[in-house]
Image: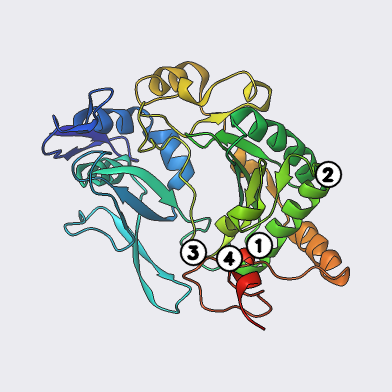
Amino acid sequence: MLEVPTPDGGARTVRVSSPDRVMWPGQGITKGDLAAYTISVGEALLRAIGDRPVTLQRFPTGIDGEEFYSKNPPRGVPDYASTTTCTYPSGRSHQQLVVDEIATAVWAVQMNTVTFHPWPVRTVDNDNPDELRIDLDPQPGRDYRDAVEAAIALRGLMGELGLTAWAKTSGNRGVHVFARIAPTHEFLDVRHGVIAIARELERRLPDLVTTAWWKEERGEKVFVDFNQACRDRTIASAYSPRPIDGAPVSMPLPWERLAEVSPGDFTVRTVPGILASGGDVWAGMGEQVGDVASAIALWDKDVEAGLGEMPFPPDYPKMPGEPPRVQPSRARRQPD
């Protein structure tokens, strides 16, 4: 049993079964260690995922075993936890967990959650994002340093559009760049704004950055994954551990430190001390709310110039204006 602080200053008891189960075999980090980590970073974690629908990435036997994503709340949701209704690309709707207490996050760890994947919306309006998120993913031949170079250029571009950019390590090789926005536009509009930003970044850094959806066309560049802006697509939250050897954590960083560090510096073992001494770098994000309209206007300008829709994820229904959803090399082999 663990005593977990509550928002009102009290405490709540949360049972964690099998605390000795090893979640990261290479480091000997157990489920009990993961629960303790979650409590230690709880306030900062809640700033990242609180009041949002959350998908849970779960590993019942540790990161080397079975993996699945829970969109429906797992069975046995405690009565102090809340849920919210989300609508998916298929048109179906169902409940998703909302993590508004540290105790709920610890209970999710009890259900073998390693990584929290929050939606970019608040529960009051699950259709209009209040965060713009951009995933910079280095392709083979590129690495974290290349993602940092792209991220710094991206920060400048977003600033020109009236958006305050915040950076974190992905927990692997990439960089995630976020901006808080007013929830004035629905997912498709925000996705178009992200595509426009990605295209402009590619124009400025053509030898480094690509927006090519198909892997065979990306080359040795940093891919701007615009489809992470789609409905029901999520990015690992700040302070979430990742299911990778070393137990890395997706770590918010000041811009001036981004190029100085290695993603492996930030782990389940090291982050509590770093956070305790340096504080939550993203604590002020909610005070810097931008307007996505400028990015959408950039999309409109590109459309006028002849650029159109980009491919959607494979599980999406065919979307208006979408190009053929087939790899270019396969399309070239098809008969006329």
Q: Mark 2 points at which residue?
A: 204
Q: Where residue 24 appears, x then y in whole percent?
A: 27, 30
| Position of residue 180 measured from the top left corner of the image (x, y, whole percent) | 63, 48
Label 2 vs label 1, nearer the camera: 2
Residue underneath mark 4: 128
Question: Within 10 Å of the Cα at label 3, are there few (<14), some (14-19), or many (20+) other Cα atoms?
Answer: few
Query: Which comes sooner in the sequence, label 1 or label 4?
Result: 4
Residue 164 seen in render: yes
Q: Marks 1 and 4: which is nearer the front? A: 1
Question: Residue 124: image x %, image y %?
Answer: 49, 64
Q: Mark 1 points at which residue?
A: 190
Q: Which of 59 and 123 is in front in this view?
A: 59
Q: What residue type is labelled 3?
A: Val
Where, by quadrant of the figure, is residue 209 drawn? Answer: top right
**Nearer the viewer's eye, disc 3 or disc 4?**
4
- Residue annotated with mark 3: 124
Secondary structure of the residue carrying numbered label 1: helix
Residues at marks 3 and 4, CA–CA distance in whole angstroms: 10 Å
Label 2 environment density (alpha carbons within 10 Å; few <14, some 14–19, many ≥20)? some
Q: Which amino acid does label 4 sit on?
A: Asn
Identity of the residue drawn at 66% across and 70% down? 332
